Amino acid sequence: MKNTALTERHIALGAKMVPFAGYAMPVQYEGVTIEHETVRNGVGVFDVSHMGEFILKGDRALELIQRFSSNDASKLYDGKAQYSCMPNGKGGIIDDLIIYRINENEYFLVVNASNIEKDWEWISAQNDLGVEMANVSDDYSLLAIQGPDAAKAMQSLTEVDLSNMTYYTFEHNRFAGIENVMISATGYTGSGGFEIYVRNKDANKLWDSVFEAGKAFNIKPIGLAARDTLRLEMGFCLYGNDINDETSPLEAGLGWITKFTKDFVDSDFLKKQKEDGVTKKLVAFEMIDRGIPRKDYQIFDAESNCIGKVTSGTMSPSLKVGIGLGYVNLPLNKLDTEIYVAVRNKMLKAKVVKLPFYKS
């Protein structure tokens, strides 16, 4: 089991630690609901240093990225980030990721912790272009500072005008007295904020400075359990739940990051799937009957036919109702369609709704 550079800080704060993707990670501190509300209404800090980071360098780096990723990375410019996914050559998804353009010959990729090795091998196998690759996952720590007060709370730590940073842009600058920090206006919560990348040696200094600067805003540490409820209220996909090696980006509602303006792995297959139409689709649903949907619970139609299964589910701390994502057969993906979720052998009524569940 690996530790992040901040493990001792979490233990000292009384975090409940659990194994996650090979790391000991804080799942919660005070409790999921209070942590969730802290991020929705104020500012909270996640240690997400378990995430993977790769650097691709060379004059053919973009060509390689265009080959393995579904989105069109030629639209990137220096200081711009892009959400994308890597199709697996069999109609499924290797992983979803964020691609950062440092300059025209250098890109920084952030991948899911549980897929670091798989992703590295996949990209390496595509690289017959002489692109220089570095897996720097063990060198970097990552703090996600999230919530509507994030910019105000952190402004004293940097000369970068945080409140005017556009979503999915980033810059390298001094932050908390540390040089060359990557400050990214991204996140997985839907409440605004930043993701801050530093070398491991600077992680504790960053953590302490962030909490000192955020004191006046009642900043709190947040665990991975609240990260999950926050992302689910937004309908953000989680790899291993809502997307995996057997779900296509089109089935998962990721057509917006699947660009046929170029050739890429699976582009012919996906083009045909788009023309023919998918047979199942990832939908969002809200419980009408009282109950909490969970991963792998079966979904039924009114005639008791099994039409799919839940991929993510929880009791929404913001809405106080059970919410979930799941794949259902068409045409039962239409808005307001009544479906039934089998919760502990009871058929509980739900309805298909539009994302996001939570609207700020």
Image (cartoon, helix red, strand yellow):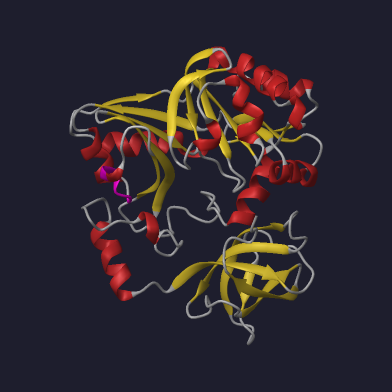
Report the label total: 0
- Left or right of residue 121: residue 180: right
Q: Position of residue 283 (x, y in %)?
A: 54, 67
Image quarter in which the N terminus is found: top right
Q: Residue at x 64, y 47 (%)?
A: 228
Name which quarter of the figure residue 104 lies in. top left
Residue 171 % position (x, y): 43, 28
Where in the figure is residue 83, as x and y percent of width and height?
42, 46
Q: Residue at x 21, y 53 (%)?
A: 262
- By secondary structure, the bulk of the magenta-drawn segment is best described as loop
Whether residue 119 is visible to the viewer of this picture, yes or no, is yes
- Residue drawn 39% across and 72% down? 278
Q: Position of residue 266 (x, y in %)?
A: 28, 56
Front residue of 184 and 302: 184
Q: Nearer the viewer, residue 41 or 97?
A: 41
In the rendered image, is residue 46 in sight? no
Relative height, residue 66 to residue 142 (above, below): below
Quadrant in which the C terminus is drawn: bottom right
| Viewer-proximal residue among 288 and 116 | 288
Residue lying at the far bottom in this picture: please name it. 303
Question: Magenta span has 26?
Answer: no
Position of residue 238 in the picture relative to residue 75 (left or right): right
Q: Quadrant of residue 354?
A: bottom right
In the rendered structure, the answer to whether residue 57 lies left or right of residue 203 reads left
| Residue 259 located left or right of residue 139 | left
| 56 or 138: nearer the viewer | 56
Q: Is residue 79 above or below residue 343?
A: above
What residue span does the magenta drawing correspond to? Answer: 70-74
